[in-house]
Image (spheres, grey):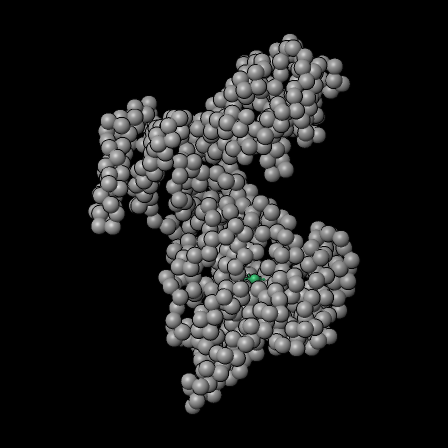
Amino acid sequence: MLATLRSIAESVSQQANLDSALACFVTMVKEAMQTQCCSIYFADYSQDNFVLMATEGLNPDAVGKFRIGFTEGLVGLVAQREEAINIAFAKSHPRFKLSPEVNEEGYNAFLSVPVVHQKKVLGVIVVQQKMARVFSQDEESFLITLSAQLASQLAHAEIKEVLRQDESSHQTSVLKGVSSAPGISIGHAFVVIPKVNFKSIELEKESDVNEQRRLFTQAVAATRKEFNTLSMTLSDSIPHEALAVFDVYQQLLDAKSLGHNVEMELQQGWCAKSALKIVIERLIAQFNAMQDPYIKERAVDVKDIGLRVLHHLVNTEFAIKDYPPNTILIAHTLTPAMLAEVPNDRLVGVVSINGSANSHASILTRAMGVPAIWGIEDIPLLQLNSKPMILDAFSGRLYISPSQMLIDEYTELQHQDNLLNNRFLAEQNFTAVTLDGEHISLLLNAGLELNTQQNSAHICDGVGLYRTEAWFMQKGQFPSQSEQETWYREVLNSYYPNPVVMRTLDIGGDKVLDYFNITEENPFLGWRGIRISLDHPELFLDQLKAMLKANIGLGNLKIMLPMISGSEEVDESLALFEQAYFELNEQYPEQTIERPDIGIMLEVPSSVFMLADWSKKVDFCSVGSNDLTQYLLAVDRSNARVAELFNPYHPAVLRVLNNVARECQQYELPFSLCGELGGDPEGAILLIAMGYRRLSMNLSSLNKVKWVLRRLHVSEMEALLKECLAQSSAKQVLRLTRSFMIEHELGNLFYTPK
Ligand code: PEP
Ligand code: MG
C-alpha cells in the first residue's frame, strides 16, 4: 500500500499542470482500488459549489462544467461533515441526488472522502462502482491517507495554476500569510534562491530550443570544471581508486547519456531546467527499481550530478539579477543573514514560507520596521521572482501582479499609515507618563540589528535587553575577549548614563552559529542559552570579563542570564561571575572594576515558581514573554503551522505574568518585561495594569507605545485587566482590549486596510 501511495503522489507531482495532475490522480486511484470510477471535485467558494475537475468513469464532457451545490447530494454531505462516507447503495441514501449529466446512474457503491488543507475543504474525492459493495476499512484508510497527502500538493497546484493564469490574463492573485511586522509595501519580488532541488522546479516550455540547449551545455561545462577541481583538490588526500568516482561522474555527463536524454526533452519544447528534471527523475526511478543494491546506489550519484547541473543552470539565470529598488524579499525560510544582504534603502517588505511572528528573523524585521508576513503557501517560489506585488502586512496578504486600481488604493493607505507614524514621531522626545502621572520606563530591545542605534538613545530610558548573540552569529568564529570588550563598550557608551542590560550568549533554538555545530531533534528544548554557557565556562568567563572591562569608568552595565530553569544554574552562573570578577581584579589591581547588577530572564515556566528563592540571589529579573509563551503553551515560536496557537493573550499566560508581578513586588525584586508583548500597545496596557513599570521593546514599537500611554489613565487599564483576567480565551481577551482602545479613541491604531 505504501509503495502505491508513494507512486501516486510522485506521479501527480510530476505533471506539468493542474489538469493533467488531476487526470493522473483519478486514473491511478481507480486502478489502485480496482474499481470502476474515480472523480475529483474542487470547491469553488465564489459560487458555493463543487465543480467536477477530473473523472475516470463519469461523463468526460462534464469535466469543468458539472457543478453541485455545497449542501447538495452526497458530495456536499462529505464536505459538510468533513468525513468519509462509505455505502453500498448510494441511491438509497436520503441525500442522494441523481445528476444525469454525469452518467452515474449505473453506479451503486460509493466511497468518498473530503480533501482538507489547513482546516479548509478544498474538494472531494469519490470512488464508485456498479456492484454494490462496502469498501473495506483498509480501502477507506487508503483513500483518506491519499487525500491527506495530496491536499497540500493540490493546494499548491491550484495556486500555481492561478499564478500561471495571472500571467496571461493580467489578473491579481493573492497569497495569505500571518502578519509579523505591520505595514504596507509596494514593490517587486526578489526570491532568495533556495537550496535548489528538483521539487522546486516548475515544468515549463520554452520556444527557443537553441537557447535552452546553450544554457544546458554551459551548465554541463561548469559542472565538469567543478568535478575537475574537486578531483584535483582531493587527489592528495584520498586513495587513487576512490578518485575513479569522478570518471564515472564525467561519463554520466557525456552527451551519450545525460546529454542525449536531455536533448530529446528539449526537442519536445521543455526548457533546460524542466528537461533536466524530467530526465534525472526518470533515471532515479529506473535505478531505484533495480534489485541489485550496487546499481540502486547509483540513483544517489545521478541525483547529485543532476543537482549540480541544475545549480549552475539556476545560477546563470540569477547571476545577472540585482535587488530591485523596492525589494520585497521572498524566501523559503528567512534568516537574519538574508536580510542583512539587501541594501537597507532597497528593502521594503519581507515574505517567508517558514517561520512565524516570534522567530528571531521576524523580530528583526519588526526592529527594522520592515513589513513582513510569514507562513504563505509552500509554492515553488521562483515563479514569483521579479513580479510586481503589494504586501499588506496588516492583514497578512500578498497581492501578485496587482491592478493599477489596487496600487492606487494601497498607495493612499500607505500615505495614511505614514501620517499616523508621523504623529508618533512627533512625541518621541517626550517621556512616557500616563494621564494620572505614572512614569513608565520604556527601554530598547537592541542587538539583533547589528548597528547600534545611537540615535535612539535620547528617546528611550536605556536598553532593557541587549541580545549579544547576533554579533556572534555574524562572525566566522568566537570573538576574542578584547574584540567583545570593544564592541560592548561602544554599546554602553551609546546609551550612557542610562542602563544597558546585556544578556549573555543565548544561542541554540533558532539561533545557530555556523562554527559551533548544534544539531538536535528538538532544539528549543535542548542545548540553549545558559546551558551552553555553563557547559563552556571558558566562553562564558570570556564574555563576562569582556562586559566587566567594557564597563570600567562607565558603570551603566547590568548582566542578564537567559533560559534559567533551576537553582543550580543560578548558583553556577553567579559562581562563575565571582570568578571572572576576582580574576579581573587580580589582573588589573589599579582599575576600579564595578560590580554590576545581575539578573535572570523568566522564560522557562519553572522559573516563575522560584522567585521566593532566587530573589535572595539576584538583583532583578525580566520576563521573556516570547519564550515563556512558547513553553507555557507548548507551541514552537517559529513554526508557521501552529502560529495561531502562539498567543501571549492566552489567559494562562496573562495570569502567570500577573503572578510574577505580585511575587516580585512581595519579594522586592525589581522586574521588567522584554518580550514582544510589551511592544504591543494592548499588551503594554495590561502589563502596566499588572504593575510592570519597565517595558523593553524594539524601536519601531517604542514611539507607538509611548504615544498610547500618554493618552490613558492607569486606573482605566486596571479595570480592563480585571475583566481580561476573568476571561477563558485569548479571543475574548482581545475583544475586550480592542473595545477598550476604540472607546479611548485609539481604534485607528488597528486600522486594517482590507
Ligand atoms: C523572550 O524570550 O521573550 C526574549 C526576549 O528573548 P528572545 O526573543 O531573544 O528569545
Ligand atoms: Mg528568550
Q: Please, is residue 433 above or below residue 130 in the view? A: below
Q: Please, is residue 92 above or below residue 358 in the view? A: above
Q: Tell me if I can see residue 56 in this picture.
A: yes
Image location (x, y in percent) of residue 185: 49, 50
Out of 440 and 507, give the one closest to the viewer: 507
Q: Tell me if I can see residue 741 in this picture.
A: no
Out of 699 and 754, give the one closest to the viewer: 699
Q: Quadrant of ligand 1?
A: bottom right
Q: Please, is residue 684 above or below residue 72 in the view? A: below
The residue lying at 73 percent from left, 75 percent from top is 666
The residue lying at 70 percent from left, 19 percent from top is 87
Image location (x, y in percent) of residue 560: 55, 71
The residue lying at 56 percent from left, 49 percent from top is 639
Image location (x, y in percent) of residue 685: 68, 64
Find residue 590 and report its image quarter: bottom left
Find residue 475 and report its image quarter: bottom left
The residue lying at 50 percent from left, 40 percent from top is 378
Out of 714 and 688, give the one closest to the viewer: 688
Image location (x, y in percent) of residue 598: 57, 76
